[in-house]
Image (tube, rainbow, N blue to C red):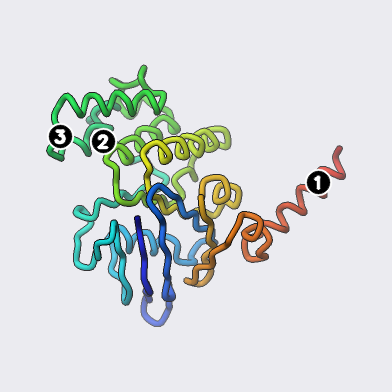
Amino acid sequence: MMEVRNLAKSYGQQPILRNINLIVEQGKTLAVLGRSGCGKTTLLRIVAGLISPDNGKVLLDGKDMEGVPTHLRNAVYMNQEPLLFPHLTVRQNIAFGLKIRSISVQQIQKEVSTMLEQLGLQDHADKWPDQLSGGQRQRVSFGRAIITQPSVLLLDEPFGNLDTDTRQQMQELFLQLTRTYQTTSLLVTHDLKEAILVGNETAYMEEGELYFYDSPAAFLADPRTGGASELAFWKQYMNNNI
């Protein structure tokens, strides 16, 4: 479980986050939609411990993270670039986070084999990252992150560099993995469809403030999200072209 209380951040005289409060329950994903510069990435970076807030608290699994360095938070930050270790194979990349913990070799092998199967990468286990496609590298990155069972997975436009078909496959894989491992996730995106498909809950960020919705219908109906206008466009398009 992840909780944020009264989080605020400014740069100079410019407020970036304004008293953000949110809770993401265990195994759930909160998808935050918003335009560039609205504060989405700043929120992720504060939760990860990469920058400090001016006010407020971040709690992971009920523990206050004030003063806790990034590497001790058990929070994994992912963006558009997979950032795999180029000198490690697919299997070794996925196993990396487990190897630095007190886990037996046999248990690591078992968990990595299971993850490779879920990722559909059994036949690529001994390949190097530069031998993989962009989508395959992102699969490895997700596997490496989720296998460690982080307190929270922080996702900053993770599918942004992928083509449409691969992006859809990765969204489906993400849903499958987070359900299997009960991963708690905070996803920020500018893609309306992605926010609805991936998020158990949705929110919209504007000028550092966060707005929550009771249902996907309410999310789409809010003029700020652009959902109603997008639906109207496609309805008109279909009427004119069929």
Marker disc for residue 103 = 3
Q: Please report the residue visible at 45 percent of the width from the left and 50 percent of the height from the top.
A: 29
Q: Is residue 79 among what the camera can see?
A: yes
Rendered view: 12 above or below 155: below
Marker disc for residue 85 = 2
Residue 90 % position (x, y): 30, 27
Q: What kind of element bears circle 3?
A: loop
Mark nearer the viewer, 1 or 2? 1
CA gap, disc 3 and disc 2: 21 Å
Q: What kind of element bears circle 1?
A: helix
Q: Please report the residue visible at 43 percent of the width from the left and 49 percent of the height from the top.
A: 28
- Circle 2: is it few (<14), some (14-19), or many (20+) Cα within 10 Å? some
Rendered view: 181 above or below 69: above
Marker disc for residue 237 = 1
Q: Amino acid at mark 3?
A: Ile
CA gap, disc 1 and disc 3: 56 Å
Q: Quadrant of the C terminus?
A: top right
